[in-house]
Amino acid sequence: MSDLSTSFGGTPRRVFNINPKPLGVALALVVLGAIYLAQTVSAKQAALYVLGALLGITLYHAAFGFTSAWRVFIADGRGAGLRAQMLMLAIGVLLFFPALSAGTLFGHPVVGEVAPVGTSVVIGAFMFGVGMQLGGGCASGTLYTVGGGSTRMVVTLLAFVVGSVVGTAHMPFWSALPHFQPVSLVKTLGVAPAIALNLVVFAAIAAVTVLIEKRRHGHLVSERTPGTTGTSVWLRGPWPLLVGGAVLAVLNFVTLALSGHPWGITSAFALWGAKAFSAMGVNVASWHVWSTGPNAAALAAPISHDVKSVMDIGIVIGAMVAASLAGRYAPVWRLPLRSLIAAIVGGLLLGYGARLAYGCNIGAYFSGIVSGSLHGWLWLVSAFFGNVVGTKLRPAFGLAVERVKQTGC
C-alpha cells in the first residue's frame, strides 16, 4: 500500500518505547471527533469515524501493502503480500455476496461498488498503477503513512487531491469512450457460483505466486519478524500480513453495514479538491460532475457530512495512534528533489487515474471485487501492468526497489 510496509525488520523494538505526546493528541482527536460528529451529524457518522480510525490502526500495524507488495513481486518474485490480498478478497466475497444478493443487511438496504467496464477503467487503472510506485503509496497507503508521520506522503496526498479534482473536470470526455454497462457477477451468475468462481481465481493467483517465489528463491521468503511477542504485538504491532488482510475484510463489511456502501476513499479527495478550487474562485459547481445529484449536494454540504471524508480523516488519526504506540512517530522533513518530483507526479497520476477508473485500490479493486463488479478485475489487471512500468521508473527518481539479499553459492 505504501513504502512504509517494507520498513519492519527483524530487529526487536523495546516494549515500552512509545511516543506519548502524539499518542495523547491522536487519542484526543478520536474521542473529540466522535463526540462532535455525534452531536452535529449523527451517531452513525461518529461510528464511521471511529471505524476509520480502526482501519488506520490495522493498515499501519499490519503494514498491509498494495504498492510494496506488488513491487516486490514484480521485481523479486516475493508473493506474501499478494497472497494476503487474496485471503482478504476471499473473506470479503464470502461476507459481501450473500448480503448484496439480498439487498439488505441487518434490515438496512445495501449496494455494492459496481461500475462500467471500459476504456476509462483500463487507462485510469494503468495510470494509478504507475502513480502507486512513483508516489510511494496508493489511496489508503497515502493516508496511513501521512498519519504515521511521513512528510513525503503529505506531498503525494496534496498532488493526489489536485489530480482527483482535475479528473472530475474531464470525466464527460472519458465516460463517453467505448465501454460496457456495469456487470455484477452476483446478479449474473448467482451467489453460490459467483463465490465459487472468485475463490478458484483467488486460489489460482496465490498458487502462481508460490510457484514463482519458489522458482526464484527456492523457498517462500519470510517477509518480516515481529519485534514484540505475546499480547503486546496486537497493541504495538507489527501484525502478520494474513491477520491484517482478514481484519480489513471484516472492517469493510462493517462499513457496508453502517453506511450501506463498501469502503471507498478517493471520492473524498475529489470533494476536498473541488471545495478548495471553489474557495479560490473556480466555478466548480458548473462542471458536469458537480452540477447535479449527490455530488452537488456533497459540494454544498460540510465535509463532516461526507462518509468517505470522515472515514479518511479517521484513517489518518488511527495510523497516528498506531505509529505512536509502536514508537515510530518521528516525521522527517528532508526530502530529496528527485523524490519530491516523484511524489508530485505520482500523486497527480493517482488522483487522475482513480477518477477515470471509478475508484482506487480500495474502491475499485478491493470493494469492487467483493461487490462482484467485473470492473474490479479489469482494474486489477490494468493497475498491475501500471505497477510494472512504475517499478522500472523508480530508480530514475532515486527510489529503491527491494530485493532479497542472496547468500551462499
Image (cartoon, rainbow, N blue to C red):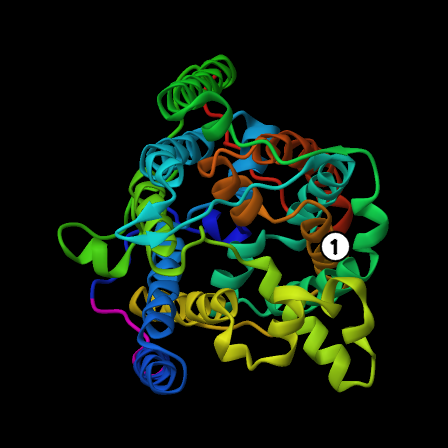
Instruction: Please tell me whether mark 1 sits on a helix, a strand or a loop.
Output: helix
- Magenta residues, start to end: 16-21
Pinpoint residue 22: horizontal percent, then vertical percent.
37, 80
Pinpoint residue 367: horizontal percent, then vertical percent.
48, 44
130, 4: nearer the viewer: 130
Dot 1: within a 10 Å radius of its alpha carbon, few (fewer than 14), some, or many (20 or more) residues? many
What is the magenta segment's predominant secondary structure? loop
Pinpoint residue 226: horizontal percent, then vertical percent.
28, 47
Residue at left offset 64%, top offset 31%: 378
Q: How many marks?
A: 1
**60 shown above or below 69:** below
270 vs 29, left or right, is: right
Residue at left offset 46%, top offset 19%: 201
Pinpoint residue 317: horizontal percent, then vertical percent.
41, 72
Q: Residue furthest left?
A: 230
87, 91: nearer the viewer: 91
Residue at left offset 50%, top offset 35%: 369
**394 shown above or below 196:** below
- Is residue 323 among what the camera can see? yes
- Is residue 10 among what the camera can see? no
240 vs 356, left or right, is: left
Q: Is residue 101 magenta?
A: no
Indicate the quadrant where residue 276 lies.
Answer: bottom right
Check disc 1 and report the residue beneath it.
Answer: 352
Residue at left offset 45%, top offset 72%: 330
Q: Label 1 sits on what residue type? A: Tyr
